[in-house]
Image (spheres, rainbow, N blue to C red):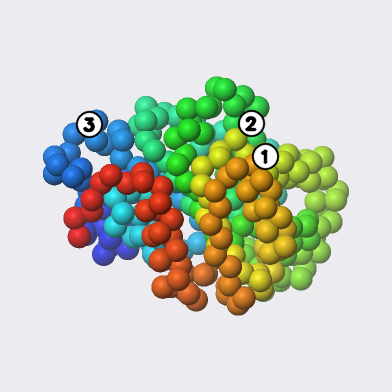
Amino acid sequence: MLGRTALSRGVTTHRLSKNVTLYMNELASPASGCQTKASEDNKPLTLMLPWLGSRPQAVAKYCEIYFRTGFDVLVVESEVKEFLWPRWGLDHGKSLLELLNSERFVSRPLLVHAFSIGGYTFSQLLVHVSKDTQKYQDLTNRIKGQVYDSLVVGSLETMAVGLGKTVFPRWETLVKQVSLLYFRMFRRQTVDYFNMGIDAFWNSPVTAPALFFFCKNDPLSDPQALEELIDFWQKRGINITAKKWEDSTHAGHIKRHPQEYVTTLDMFLHSLHIAPLKAKM
């Protein structure tokens, strides 16, 4: 849950399921000042996919940016089991896809903001979309922007390192070795599914402008692999903004470089022209 400060300022919490929470931003109202069902249906929604083990107060910093801009925020958390057994990850992606297409959200303009393994969760949604792009065309058209912070990209070893650092940091080396063994033993149930998700992400049917935050010293995100992805997307005609630091922290850029992070994100959001609402601060 977000901190009481945010909630006391007009943000209401709706727990939709164990790992899904909707934050309704009552601070935002149409320019006319009158809230209607039509204006609610067209109110922009940020789909926020946090990193593993994220704390509510850390996620709240990002939500605040969107509340100021006039967005509601839908926080969808991931679990390590969905990564270790990707079929469960696909089920999670399917449930998220159905939620975004439900009556409550079906007409909302969307912005995706994924951190670290949250990008994996979104890729599982994209696997389903890629199988029937015509069926989900309305959804992909509703996604007006995408933000990726510390996207986990690179080798299988990079993913194993990520598990150790985020889930069991005290046994990081052991977790890495066991994870690699596990991935190799259950290749058809893990690696083959990872490759399917990676392919769906690289060839994503979502072509909205994208913003990438990353750094050169992130052990969980290979900057060269990420730059190759950015170059590939640019050649596909996707408008890309990239903010790269020499030295920063995985999923902690806003803490290390707060002014640059917020300014870059604010400029990106402004360029999308999807927030006709004004927040009453």
Q: CA distance from mark 2 to mark 1?
A: 9 Å
Which tag, 3 or 1, sits closer to the chain's start? 3
The numbered disc on residue 203 is 1
The numbered disc on residue 37 is 3
Name the mark nearer the viewer: 3 or 1. Answer: 1
* For residue 177, above or below residue 98: below
Residues at discs 2 and 3 in contact (Cβ within 8 Å): no
Residue in the image at 66% along x and 46% along y: 235
Residue 162 in view (yes/no):
no
Please state which amino acid type lies under the numbered disc 1: Asn
* For residue 53, above or below residue 114: below
With 85 as the anchor, is 205 left or right in this view? left
Please state which amino acid type lies under the numbered disc 2: Ser
With 129 as the anchor, is 32 left or right in this view? left
Q: CA distance from mark 2 to mark 3?
A: 32 Å
Please state which amino acid type lies under the numbered disc 3: Lys
* Residue position marked by numbered label 2 in the rendering: 130
Which tag, 2 or 1, sits closer to the chain's start? 2
- Residue 223 appears at what percent x and percent y? 68, 64
Residues at discs 3 and 1 in contact (Cβ within 8 Å): no
Considering depth in this image, is 206 or 232 the residue closer to the camera?
232
Count of numbered marks:
3
Q: Is disc 1 surrounded by few (<14), some (14 to 19) or many (20+) residues within 10 Å?
A: some
Residues at discs 2 and 1 in contact (Cβ within 8 Å): yes
Quadrant showing the C terminus: bottom left
Local SS, label 3:
helix
Residue 106: name its quadrant: top left
Q: Is disc 3 surrounded by few (<14), some (14 to 19) or many (20+) residues within 10 Å?
A: few
